[in-house]
Image: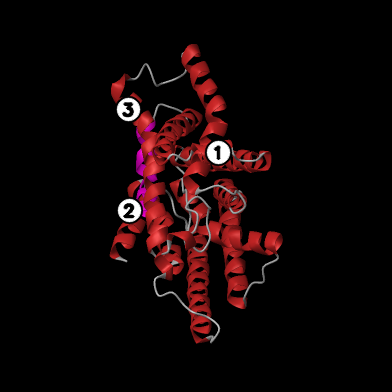
Amino acid sequence: MRRGLGFGVAAFGMWGLFPLFWPLLKPAGSVEILAHRMLWGLLLTALLLTAARQWRTLRQASARTWGLVVLAAALIAVNWGVYIYAVNAGHVVEGALGYFVNPLFSVLLGVVVFRERLRVAQWVSVALGLAAVLVIAIAGGHVPWIALALAVSFGLYGLVKKVVPLPAQASLTAEGLVVLVPALTYLLVIEFRGDGTFVDHGIGHSLLLAAAGVVTVLPLFSFSVAARLLPLSTVGLLQYLTPVMQFLLGVLYFHEHMSAARWVGFVLIWCALVLFSFDSVRAARRAKAHTVGSPDSVVDPDSTTDPDSAPDPDAGISASGPARTG
């Protein structure tokens, strides 16, 4: 349990510190940073997949599977690109709002796509989240498109990942292969035109761009370990560490403006998430108690640490939290 908590805090903590990393890559633009993140991330995951001898999984994947991978890769590219832009354009707080809203958007997706029924507390949470977005939009005079783009892209990404029949490591590598050609082509074109920054801004800058792959992959695999060692409810609560850290960095470190109405909106979303989390934990305990009390059921006391029952660490946000924030 303690080891799992350590990996969980490390994963969500690294994601929470992302606002400090992306500005280090300037003067590279958001798209250039995104392309390097994809390229170097693929290199690392490909090496790991080779070490695990799992390439056959991708070679045997069906056309339908690859179609889902393409869709997933497009959605996560949008999510990553928007977040990098948000941080480097001075919208860290709005980026954090997107990841606060994301769990509630995922709940709505469950209702629309899977015809799931929500409990009263869940409906209240969703209503509070919608009210928070409306308050912030009306007070700011514009729709918080960054927050909504992050929540929608990541929520849809999680939805697609639920039906991709690939192990986490293979799935992540497959997504990297899908975006390899456009990412590499873009980088070569801007370097040829003289607009790229990888070659002409010193070895330190080049290493930082390459490190974008490390900061992408390392928290993912820390999360993978945590997801296999911790109960889903614990990981689900740990997920909020990321947007909380991002919010605090935006307010206290980057000194982004927080109007009274904006504070009201964030308080509403926090109330929604507290209610949502409390209701989820209570429902999980009731389900566990019902299972234990059933004479037809035998409960494995180590079931929360069974690797086969752990969530896919690339499956977006669910009870186990987000897989790739920022």
Element carrying mark 1 = helix
The magenta segment: 10-25
Q: Identify the residue under disc 1.
A: 58
Give the tally of numbered discs. Answer: 3
| Left or right: 148 in relation to 254 | right
Which tag is nearer the camera, tag 1 or tag 2?
A: 1
How would you classify the magenta stretch by its main secondary structure?
helix
Q: Identify the residue under disc 2.
A: 10
Name the residue type under label 3. Leu
Q: Identify the residue under disc 3.
A: 207
Distance (Cα) linking label 2 and label 3: 23 Å
| Left or right: 49 in relation to 125 | left
Could you tell which of marks 3 and 1 lies nearer the N-terminus? Answer: 1
Element carrying mark 3 = helix
Name the residue type under label 2. Ala
Q: Residue at x 33, y 56 (%)?
A: 7
Name the residue type under label 1. Leu
Give coordinates of residue 280: x percent, y percent. 51, 72
Q: Residue at x 43, y 65 (%)?
A: 237
